[in-house]
Image: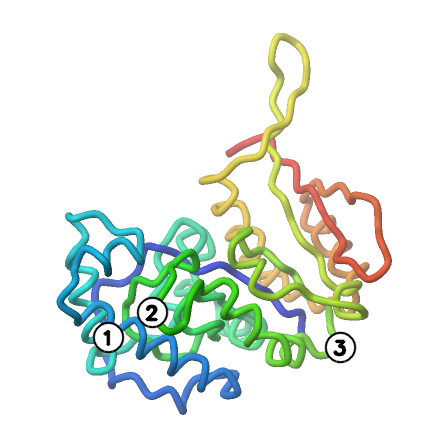
């Protein structure tokens, strides 16, 4: 099994799709389709309904973002695009999937899963329409999406992990929707990005946000370009070091993911 790379989605998305309408039966991880259908129905009905204020509140949108409601209301008939082209945020700009050479692109298609408040998780080749559905949303009949997907994702994600290592680069809210357990957890590596700089002659470190996303995008791109094929968590950590990343590992705990600090001097 290739390494499974878990990424967060991005709020930034392509303005419109370019291909056929949504067909849930064509999406990867088909066992998630009943859950996807329930969330999709709740989202479309909410956004097409008469109470715009309630819909904006549920999705955390401002008055100036009411266009997102109209977009969501048309999800079943909107044109789609592969997830690889749909997400356009900072991480995906740094990953720059469109410029990967063929071998690296094939590896990305096999390895990458993108978390989603609407779809649960999708692969890069899955065709989906542009949407707005943050993981922090609470939808009528579905409830809080983080809790909903936490109960729905388990077996599908465990199967996707297979017997290989897992590189979990999701942000906290999305990471909460599926936490690896047991043997899978011990093959899982999570990454925190720290910025190291010298202040008044003293080295200091701080957690970064915006540049955290860019660094993670570059990290995945470097792994794909290098053709890295780690078969264990140890090999995955070794591959990052071979790529000249400064990584420091925290204490290990049985049945828990391995936690790495990736230390960067330049942002």
In the depicted structure, whether residue 248 falls above or below residue 153: above
Residue 121 falls left or right of residue 244: left
In the depicted structure, whether residue 94 falls above or below residue 148: above
Kindly state the secondary structure of the residue where label 2 is placed.
loop
* Sooner in the amino-acid sequence: mark 3 or mark 1: 1
Q: Please name the residue shown 49% across and 66% down the image.
A: 115
Kindly state the secondary structure of the residue where label 1 is placed.
helix
Kindly state the secondary structure of the residue where label 3 is placed.
loop
Q: Quadrant of the N terminus?
A: bottom right
Q: Quadrant of residue 12?
A: bottom left
Where is residue 63? Give x, y as percent: 16, 48
Q: Quadrant of residue 175?
A: bottom right
Residues at circles 1 and 2 in contact by the CB criterion of under 8 Å: yes
Q: Nearer the viewer, residue 218 or 181?
A: 181
Residue carrying label 2: 140
Q: CA distance from mark 3 to mark 1?
A: 40 Å
Residue 63 falls left or right of residue 124: left
Residue 90 falls left or right of residue 78: right
Where is residue 48? Give x, y as percent: 17, 71
Q: Quadrant of residue 131?
A: bottom left
Residue carrying label 1: 45
Q: Please name the residue shown 69% across and 66% down the image.
A: 180
Q: Please name the residue shown 66% across and 81% down the image.
A: 159
In the depicted structure, whether residue 206 falls above or below residue 212: above
Q: CA distance from mark 1 to mark 2?
A: 9 Å
Residue carrying label 3: 163
């Amino acid at each position: 099994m290739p390494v499974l790379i878990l990424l967060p989605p991005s709020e930034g998305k392509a303005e419109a799709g370019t291909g056929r309408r949504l067909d849930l039966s064509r999406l990867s991880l088909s066992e998630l389709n009943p859950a996807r259908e329930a969330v999709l129905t709740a989202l479309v009905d909410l956004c097409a309904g008469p109470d715009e204020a309630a819909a904006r509140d549920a999705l955390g949108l401002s008055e100036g973002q009411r266009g997102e409601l109209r977009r969501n209301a048309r999800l079943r008939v909107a044109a789609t695009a592969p997830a690889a082209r749909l997400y356009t945020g900072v991480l995906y700009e740094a990953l720059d999937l469109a410029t990967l050479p063929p071998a690296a692109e094939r590896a990305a298609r096999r390895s990458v899963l993108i978390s989603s408040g609407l779809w649960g998780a999708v692969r890069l080749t899955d065709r989906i329409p542009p949407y707005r559905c943050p993981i922090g949303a609470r939808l009528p009949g579905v409830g809080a999406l983080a809790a909903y997907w936490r109960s729905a994702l388990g077996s599908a994600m465990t199967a996707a992990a297979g017997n290989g290592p897992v590189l979990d680069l999701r942000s906290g809210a999305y990471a909460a929707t599926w936490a690896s357990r047991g043997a899978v957890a011990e093959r899982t590596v999570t990454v925190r990005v720290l910025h190291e700089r010298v202040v008044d002659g003293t080295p200091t470190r701080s957690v970064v946000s915006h540049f955290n996303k860019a660094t993670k995008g570059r990290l995945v791109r470097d792994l794909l370009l290098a053709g890295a094929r780690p078969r264990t968590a140890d090999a995955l950590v070794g591959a990052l070091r071979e790529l000249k990343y400064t990584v420091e590992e925290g204490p290990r705990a049985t049945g828990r993911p391995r936690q790495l600090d990736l230390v960067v001097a330049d942002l």
